[in-house]
Image: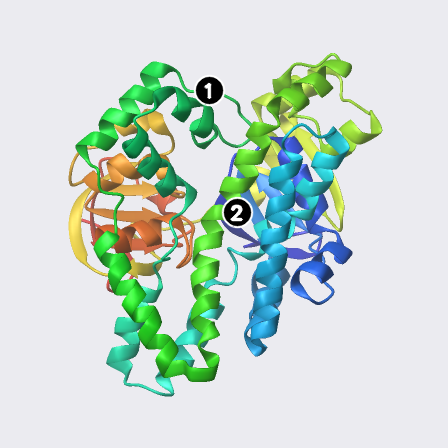
Amino acid sequence: MFKYQGVNLIKTVYRPYAPLISSLFFTGFSSQLSWRKFIGFDYKLQDALIIDGVYYYPDYHLQTFAARAVRHILKDQKNFLHLKRETLRREKAIRVKSKGTDLKTFFIAYLNYQPTLALYHICDDFIENSLRQELAKKTAAAEVDELMSHLNLPLKLNLDQKMKKWFLKTRDVSGFIKKYSWNFSRYGQHHFLTRAEATAFLNTLKKDKSLGGLENRLATKQAVKKAKTILGKKAYYVDVMQFFIYYRTHRTDILNQTFFNYYDQLVAFAKRFKLGYADFINCSYEELTTGQIPNRKTLQARRKGAIVCFSHGRIKIISGPAINHFRKLCRDKGNSGSVTGRSAFSGLVSGLVRIVKSKKDFSNFKKGNILVASMTTPAMMPIMKKAAAFVTDEGGITCHAAILARELKKPCIIGTKIATKVLRSGDEVEVDADKGIVKKI
């Protein structure tokens, strides 16, 4: 944590979105009216930083607001149902507006969807603790632990799982390229899969037809039913947790999918400013809507590296030598012996660390390696199956690594903040996911 402009900022997730998308996020976060309609009370997020793709959110959002939001949602089932309906309504709107509408209409729908991005990843601990406490009032501690170990897995398949199921069933390569290229082209980038890439992916799926976690989902279904019976009038607590776990991944898929689908319109709009797509997405939302486009030199600098600063409701994009100041502000200070985090799935294993930052690192990953990453993504599934354990910088009970760890039954420690900084590929470590500690041997 560090302080900037009088606000305490905490490291959260790594998402290398282009400045245009990031500025849309922050503009959407700052609308008090949008938040009121979404959550049911007045709120607006006005501070955050993105440094080298890492998002730093204020403590008032991650702690004070998250706790208040969960109390509000759990207080009355009607509050939860309102949030769920509003979330799905905004999702439907952004899906519709990504198909051929004018730029202003699309951007408005995109802005209105942003509270989902800011909410669903910050409530993990508060929801889990509340559910656990209610169960503990009515049943034994051992049974609570058993139920919670299954309730942490979402019953509903996410878009990535549906994609794999569809491709295995249809074997339609052309259809897959058209329907699912977005899932391989994120953060504002745009790339349609080649037939060779799609065919290679299908061949990988054929070798392992399991979508993962089918037996676990049966156990989760039984746990959901049992927990609801125990909770009685507060059975909806289980629905809250299940929806939050599912929607955390789903909302980012929607953001990436809709932006990908709107690519042709974005390119056409970029031409009005005599910009290529790469320069266009390095402009901010405000710059585009006001017509105050940065010069070529500034845009080229942003493509090499940019800090997106959201302070007291104002957005500024910083590039060039000035970004070094922000890098110094957030520099991690970790020891060289161990890192600690939260256990997402228990177990004790040893192995060699392999830091994974991108697909370029997949070829060096060996069976039995310890996967260490800022975050895991659906694209990492092949190496996650090879890994002996997962260790991540970020995440809560609803994150991708935690869910996959429970599905694959592999030790996993999440939320270490500094694992990718302290550990190095080739380090031999012991992962004690019972205690949430990774030690160098």
Q: Which of the pair 232/353 is nearer the observer?
A: 232
Residue at 78% x, 22% y is 293
Q: Which of the pair 328/126 is nearer the observer?
A: 126
Q: Is residue 145 above or below residue 346?
A: below
Which secondary structure, mark 1?
A: loop
Residue 176, image x, y percentages:
39, 26
Residue 5, image x, y percentages:
71, 51
Residue occupying the far front of the picture: 170
Residue occupying the far top of the picture: 274
What amino acid is at disc 1?
A: Phe
Mark sitting earlier along the chain (1/2): 1
Q: Which of the pair 353/206 is nearer the observer?
A: 206
Residue 398, image x, y percentages:
41, 56
Kindly identify which residue carries mark 2: 251
Instruction: Tell me the colour scheme of the image.
Output: rainbow
Residue at 34% x, 35% y is 166
When asked about the image quadrant of residue 396, the answer is bottom left
Name the side, left or right, on which 281 lies relative to 31. left
Q: CA distance from mark 1 to mark 2?
A: 22 Å
Kindly identify which residue carries mark 1: 192
Q: Which of the pair 111/355 is nearer the observer?
A: 111
Report the quarter where the N terminus lies. Answer: bottom right
Name the side, left or right, on which 118 lies relative to 138. right
Residue at 70% x, 58% y is 35
Name the side, left or right, on which 237 lies relative to 433. right
Tell me, for residue 343, which label it has, or none: none
Q: Is residue 209 above or below residue 237?
A: above
Residue at 65% x, 28% y is 319
Residue 316 in view = no
